[in-house]
Image (cartoon, coloured by chain):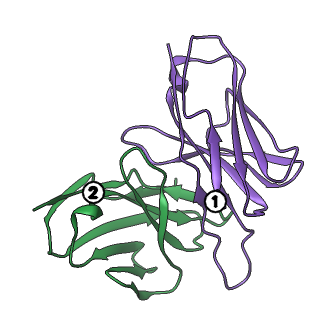
Chain colours: A green, B purple
C-alpha cells in the first residue's frame, strides 16, 4: 500500500530552527511536495524535490533521499507566522499525490 | 486574478439531502481536483479531471459525482448526503505535468460541510 508518515505535532521557539520529517512508500515516485496550511485556510505550495539533495528557498529548505524514502522540511529563524500545519505529499507512478496527515507546528515566543 | 474560488464556504445538510459544490479557477488550468480533509487524515482525492468534459475517480469517489462542462468550472455533487460526508472539501487546479517540470496544485479556500 501507499503511505506517508510525519509527526502529528511539533513545538519550537521563535528564532530557532526546526526540522519536520516525512517518510513515504508509494507505487512509483515522481517527486515530493511540501505544503503549508494555516488553520482554517487552504494549503499553499512550499517546495518540490524529485532528485536527491537539498533545495533552499529563503528560510525554508527541503531535502530528499529517494533510496531511503525520506524527506525533511527545515525552517530557520522561526517566526510566529510559521505556526501552521505542514503537509508532505508524494507523487506516485500515476502522478497522483498521496498526502500525509500533516504536522502541526506550534511556535512559542 | 481570483485564483481558485469555491462556493459555498459553509453548509449544513440533513441526511438524505442533496447539494452541489462549485469550484471555479481563472488560471486556465487543464487539471482540476476535489479533495476532502478530515481530522487526523491526509487530503483524500475524490474525483479529478484532466480536461473539459473528462472526469475520473480518485481514492474515495463513492457517494459523489462530478462534472466539468467548462474548463474553468468543476462541480462536486452529493446526491444523498450522509453524516460520513461531514468534512472540509477543497478544490484544486494545476497545469498538466510537463517533462522536466512539476505541476503544483493551487487550492481553493474550502467548503465546510456538516451533515446531520
Q: Is residue B8 above or below residue B103?
A: above
Chain identity of mark 1: A
Residue lying at 21% horizontally and 72% vertically, measured from the top left: A78
Q: Between A88 and A60, which is closer to the camera in this rendering?
A: A60
Residues at marks 2 and 1 on the same chain: yes
Residue A83: x %, y % from top left = 26, 58
Q: Quadrant of residue A108?
A: bottom left
Q: Quadrant of residue A62?
A: bottom left
Q: Between A56 and A98, which is closer to the camera in this rendering?
A: A56
Q: How many marks?
A: 2
Residue lying at 64% horizontally and 53% vertically, measured from the top left: B4
Residue lying at 79% horizontally and 61% vertically, measured from the top left: B30
Residue A75: x %, y % from top left = 28, 75
Q: Residues within 10 Å of mark 2 (few under 14, many from 20)?
A: some
Taking the image as shown, residue B80 lies to the left or right of residue B14, namely right
Find numbered disc 1 in the image and state the secondary structure of the residue it sits on. loop
Q: Quadrant of residue A100?
A: bottom left
Mark 2, residue position = A7
Residue A56: x %, y % from top left = 39, 87
**Residue projecting furthest to the front:** B1
Closer to the N terminus: mark 2 or mark 1? 2
Taking the image as shown, residue A94 lies to the left or right of residue B86, namely right
Taking the image as shown, residue A103 lies to the left or right of residue B51, namely left
Q: Is residue A94 above or below residue B22?
A: below
Q: Residues within 10 Å of mark 1 (few under 14, many from 20)?
A: some
Taking the image as shown, residue A34 lies to the left or right of residue A17, namely right
Q: Is residue B42 above or below residue B83?
A: below
Residue A72: x %, y % from top left = 34, 73
In the rendering, which numbered label is found on residue A96? 1
* C-alpha gap between disc 2 and disc 1: 22 Å
Amino acid at each position: 500500500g501507499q503511505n506517508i508518515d510525519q509527526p502529528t505535532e511539533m513545538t519550537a521557539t521563535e528564532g530557532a530552527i526546526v526540522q519536520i520529517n516525512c517518510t513515504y512508500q508509494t507505487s512509483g515516485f515522481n517527486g515530493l511536495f511540501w505544503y503549508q496550511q494555516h488553520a482554517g485556510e487552504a494549503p499553499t505550495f512550499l517546495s518540490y524535490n524529485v532528485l536527491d539533495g537539498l533545495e533552499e528557498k529563503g528560510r525554508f529548505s527541503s531535502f530528499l533521499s529517494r533510496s531511503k524514502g525520506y524527506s525533511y522540511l527545515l525552517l530557520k529563524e522561526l517566526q510566529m507566522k510559521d505556526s501552521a500545519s505542514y503537509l508532505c505529499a508524494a507523487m506516485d507512478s500515476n502522478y497522483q499525490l498521496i498526502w500525509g496527515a500533516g504536522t502541526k507546528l506550534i511556535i512559542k515566543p | 486574478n481570483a485564483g481558485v474560488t469555491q462556493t459555498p464556504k459553509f453548509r449544513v445538510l440533513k441526511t438524505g439531502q442533496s447539494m452541489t459544490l462549485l469550484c471555479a479557477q481563472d488560471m486556465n488550468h487543464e487539471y482540476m481536483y476535489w479533495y476532502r480533509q478530515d481530522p487526523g487524515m491526509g487530503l483524500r482525492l475524490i474525483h479529478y479531471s484532466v480536461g473539459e468534459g473528462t472526469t475520473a475517480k480518485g481514492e474515495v469517489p463513492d457517494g459523489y459525482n462530478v462534472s466539468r462542462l467548462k474548463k474553468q468550472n468543476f462541480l462536486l455533487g452529493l446526491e444523498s448526503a450522509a453524516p460520513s460526508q461531514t468534512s472540509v472539501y477543497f478544490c484544486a487546479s494545476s497545469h498538466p505535468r510537463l517533462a522536466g517540470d512539476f505541476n503544483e496544485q493551487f487550492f481553493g479556500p474550502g467548503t465546510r460541510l456538516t451533515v446531520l
